[in-house]
Amino acid sequence: MSLISRWQAPSNIALVKYWGKYGIQLPCNPSVSLTLQAARTETQVEAIPIVGSGGEPVQFYLDGQRKEGFEPKIWALLQLLGDDCGFWKAHSLRISSSNTFPHSAGIASSASGMAALALCLLDLELQFRGQERPPNFYQIASRWARLGSGSACRSLYGGFVSWGASKGLNSSLEEGAPLPFEVHSIFNGMRDAILMVDQAEKKVSSTVGHGLMTDHWYAERRFLQAESNTQRLLNILIEGDSQGFIELAEAEALSLHAMMMTSASNYLLMRPNTIAVIEEIRTFRKQTSLPVCFTLDAGPNVHVLYPNSIQDKVQIFLEEVSAKFCQGKRLDDAMGNGPVERISNV
Ligand code: DP6
C-alpha cells in the first residue's frame, strides 16, 4: 500500500545571518530569523512500494513539471538521514511541490522546500514504522531539514527562531528552536515587504558562498560579530528597542554582502536598484521618523521590515518604490506561525 504525506512550510528571513558552515551542515555562528506567512512551499510525498526491480527511486515535480535538477539534493538528504529514515529503501518517492509565491520571484525556496520535505519524510517514516508522532516531532523535522538546507531548520516554527548555540537560546548546532521568551509587543506581527529588484536566478549559490567563508580573511571576526549580534538582538527583542533593531538588521545585511565582496573569488549580488531602494528606505525613515528598515538575503531583493502598527503609513511608500525600481513586483509578507499539515489529494 502507498503511504502519503502533505505539508506546507514557510520561508524565513534571517536577521542575524548564517554564513559559513562546517562538518555535516553545522553553522559557524548562531542565527536568528523571522518566519514568514505568505511565502510558503506545499509538498506532497507519495511513497509507492517497489515491486520487482522497481522504477526511479525519486521523482520530483514542481508545479506539475518534473524537475530532475532538484533530485540530487533530495537524494543527498536521504543518504544523510541514514538509519533514522529507511522507509524510502522499499519505496519509490513521488514528490510534488508548489510555492505560494511566483516561481521566478527570486525568493529563496530552499528553506520552505526542505522544511516541508523533512516534515513529509518524518511523517512517512513514522507511518511506515506504525509509530505515533513523538512530542519532539518538529525538533526532529528541524534536524532533518537542516541536512537539506541549513536555513530550512528555522522554518519549522513560527515567530522568531534561532539556530546554533549561544547563551539564552534553545536551539543547537543541529536544530532550530523558537526564541524561549515573549518578544516585546512592538515586534509582534512584524511585516516584511519583499521588493523584487531582480528575479533572475542567483549567479552564485548560497552553498558556494558558505564554502568561500572557509578561507576568508575576515571569517573569524565575522563569526564573532554574528555571535555578539545574536546576544544584542535578544535584548532588543525583549526590550522593544526599535532603533537597535534597525541598526542591527541593516548592519547584518551589509556584513553578509561584504563577506561576498571580500571572499577569494569575490562576487556581487546587489544590483544598482538594490542600492537605490536602500537609499530610499533610509531617506523615508529620516523624513518620517518611522521605524522602517531593510535586510537582504543572499540576493538582490530588498526585504523591508516594519511593525504592523504603521502598515497604513508605509503602504504608499512601498507602492512608489516598487513601481520605480521593481516594475511593481513585491510580496507583502508578515510574521507567520510555522508549518501546517494538509490533506493529501490522492
Ligand atoms: C544568506 O540555507 O540557503 O539566507 O545550507 O547551503 O542550503 P545551505 O545554505 P542556505 O543559506 C542561507 C544563507 C542566508 C542567511 C540565512 O538564512 O541565515
Image (cartoon, rainbow, N blue to C red):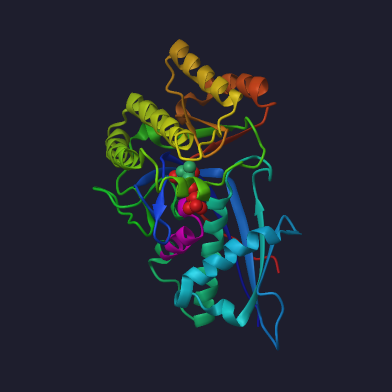
Q: Does the magenta stretch include residue 146?
A: yes
User: Which is nearer the eye, 191 or 88?
Assistant: 88
User: Which is nearer the eye, 133 or 304?
Assistant: 304
Task: Decide if residue 113 is on the left or right side of residue 133.
Answer: right
Residue 68 visible to the viewer: yes
Give the residue at x 57% y 33%: 300
Give the residue at x 45% y 39%: 263
Q: Check the image and name the residue furthest to the left.
A: 167
User: Which is nearer the eye, 204 or 251?
Assistant: 204
Q: Check the image and name the residue furthest to the top.
A: 287
Q: In which quarter of the image is residue 222?
A: top left
Give the residue at x 54% y 57%: 114
Q: Does the magenta stretch include residue 92?
A: no
Residue 307 against residue 209 in the figure, above or below: above
Residue 336 visible to the viewer: no
Q: In which quarter of the image is residue 243?
A: top left
Give the residue at x 46% y 40%: 264
Residue 179 against residue 118 in the figure, above or below: above
**Span of residues in magenta:** 140-152
The x, y position of residue 232, in whole percent, is 28, 35
The dominant secondary structure in magenta is helix
The x, y position of residue 89, in whole percent, is 58, 80
The x, y position of residue 137, in whole percent, is 43, 66
User: Which is nearer the eye, 195 or 289?
Assistant: 195
Residue 46 against residue 224 in the figure, above or below: below
